[in-house]
Image (cartoon, helix red, strand yellow):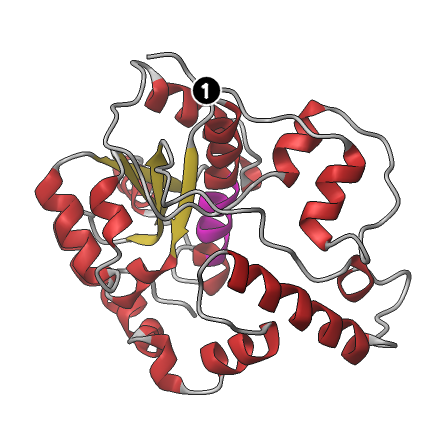
Amino acid sequence: MDVSQPTVLTAADSLALRYGADAAPAAGPWNDHLSLLLSHRSVRGYRPDALPVGTLETLIAAAQSAATSSNLQTWSVIAVTDPDKKAALSVVAANQKHIKECPLFLVWVADISRNQRLGAQENVTLETMPYQETFLVAAIDAALAAQNATVAAESLGLSCVYIGALRNNPQEVARIVGLPSGAMGVFGMCVGYASTAGATEVKPRLPQDVIVHHNTYDTTGEQAHRAAYDALLSGFSTRNDMAVDTWTKRVIGRMGKIAAMAGRDKQVATLHAMGFELK
């Protein structure tokens, strides 16, 4: 199968798509790689087409080229292609159908178990293992690796979407894919070719004036910027047949009630049970 190539846009067009024409920053240095990065979108509909031979190995090589704290490499990934396992993981993730549709589903794992085994094999006590910093490093390592893999996939004409809802029930995810103690699936990722239904336009982000602070944190103008962004995101939702919503309502809906965490409010106890002590 021929690998489709991503569309390369000019700096002005890419920035306008990402921020809206009225909030786009001035174009600076530019190349095709930056065009690819700004074209990212989450895709929630996939064709059943198989990936080219060697695709997984290429994505993992890209993932392993990401930074890793002190070269500890405290992450792993489970490549899931078995339909039954994908269906079971979909149930954990609130029945998101694209997990079953995509030809490759990756479970990205914060994994200190490998280094725990190293310590045991070398008869050395690794005193930092029980600390929260160790889990945090593992989760960050997994996220950096996954983002490299995403960029690599998109450069090959593939599409992706992150699945944070695996954290609804990490212990069930561990059972499905056979994780040892000291390993937690922190998120999943669908990889495949976007279906017609799955293709959407680039989702606008908050203007840079809200995100970037020069020398000191400054909230001047934040509410006005938020109001403009609410209008921009509402238009995006309408054009893409999504529930019409603003960013303000989205944040309140997602963070205003514990119920919206879908079980993730119990995560500290879950991590303890899975071998992360978090001192």
Residue located farthest toward the bottom when viewing the structure as drawn: 257
> At 47% across and 22% down in the image, what residue appears?
156
Q: Which residue is drawn at 52% across and 63% down?
A: 237
Image position of 170 (left or right of 175): right
Q: Which residue is drawn at 33% across and 45% down?
A: 45
- Looking at the image, can residue 83 be seen? yes
Horizontal side of 208 relative to 234 (left or right) equals right
Q: Quadrant of the C terminus?
A: bottom left
Residue 42 in the image: x percent, y percent? 46, 47
Count how many numbered circles sit on residues in the image: 1
Compared with 212, 56 (above or below) is above
Q: Quadrant of residue 54?
A: top left
Give the left or right position of residue 198, taking residue 218 as reference: left
Considering the numbered disc 1 on the image, is that residue within a helix, a strand or a loop? Answer: loop
Residue 68 found in image quarter: top right
Give the residues drawn in magenta, as a range. Answer: 136-144
**Residue 128, position as x, y percentages in the image:** 45, 55
Magenta segment main secondary structure: helix
In the image, residue 182 above or below residue 246: above
> Residue 127 or 244: which is nearer the viewer?
244
Amino acid of disc 1? Ser
Q: Taking 34 as reference, is 269 above or below it? A: below
Q: At which x and y percent is residue 176? A: 13, 50
Question: Would you say residue 203 sits in the magenta stretch?
Answer: no
- Residue at the spot of label 1: 4
Magenta stretch containing residue 143, yes or no? Answer: yes
Give the crowd class for mark 1: few <14, some 14-19, many >=20 residues within 10 Å: few
Task: Point out the image quarter for the N terminus.
Answer: top left
36 left or right of 237 in image = right
